[in-house]
Image (cartoon, rainbow, N blue to C red):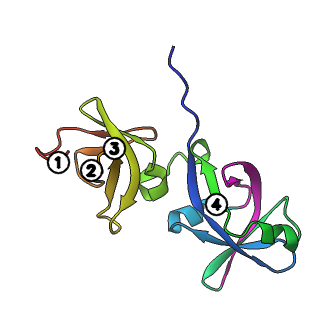
């Protein structure tokens, strides 16, 4: 009987300082795709534990300000400064490509021709030229190479160039 893997949490960004007296909090997304996921009604996890529901998100200056349904006072909002916001992988829209979320790839297992070689520990490089950092071993795998396929639960590498891994 196959064991069910726990649902992965994908980091969206961090909360900043409180804004206003009604519980608004500045949000610092990891990227534009992470920012776009934070919409009214989205359920997120605070530091991987406390579940919050977004009531509104607005642009203010160069950043975003988010309000949560259960946070209505500035005192509570101040307590959340520097907290990490995550989303469950199962709550992502089906049409979303995980390659758009760098944090979405971290923790995925990597297999070469059916044999597991490691896990993604980081993503580096410029957009369009990202490399996956694998552990153990510290190998770099070009994300956009034709022999790399990204799935929701696994990255597969088929027939990589000799000496790459």
Q: Which residue is mark 2?
A: 139
> Which disc is residue 84 wearing?
4
Mark 2 burial class by Cα count in 10 Å: few <14, some 14-19, many 20+: some
Mark 3 burial class by Cα count in 10 Å: few <14, some 14-19, many 20+: few
Q: Which residue is mark 1?
A: 164
Q: Which residue is mark 3?
A: 136
The Cα atoms of the two marked residues, 4 and 1, are separated by 35 Å
Q: Is residue 51 left or right of residue 105?
A: right
Residue 53 lies in magenta, yes or no?
A: yes
Residue 129 lies in magenta, yes or no?
A: no
Q: Residue at x 32, y 66 (%)?
A: 125
1 vs 2, front mark: 2
The Cα atoms of the two marked residues, 4 and 2, are separated by 28 Å
Of residues 56 and 107, the one drawn nearer to the viewer in this rendering: 107
Percent of width and height locating residue 35 = 58, 66
Percent of width and height locating residue 118 = 34, 40
2 vs 3, front mark: 3
């Amino acid at each position: 009987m196959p064991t069910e893997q726990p649902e992965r949490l994908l980091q969206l960004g961090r909360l900043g300082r409180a804004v206003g007296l009604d519980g608004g909090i500045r949000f610092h997304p990891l990227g534009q795709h992470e920012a776009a996921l934070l919409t009214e009604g989205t359920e997120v996890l605070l530091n991987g534990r406390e579940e919050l529901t977004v009531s509104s998100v607005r642009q203010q200056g160069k950043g975003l300000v988010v309000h949560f349904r259960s946070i209505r006072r500035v005192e509570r909002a101040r307590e959340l400064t520097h907290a990490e916001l995550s989303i469950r992988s199962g709550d992502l829209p089906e049409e979303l490509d995980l390659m758009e979320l760098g944090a979405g790839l971290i923790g995925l297992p990597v297999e070469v021709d059916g044999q597991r070689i490691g896990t993604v520990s980081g993503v580096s490089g410029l957009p369009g030229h990202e490399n996956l950092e694998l552990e153990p071993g510290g190998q770099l795998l070009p994300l956009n190479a034709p022999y790399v396929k990204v799935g929701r639960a696994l990255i597969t590498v088929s027939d990589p160039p000799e000496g790459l891994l």
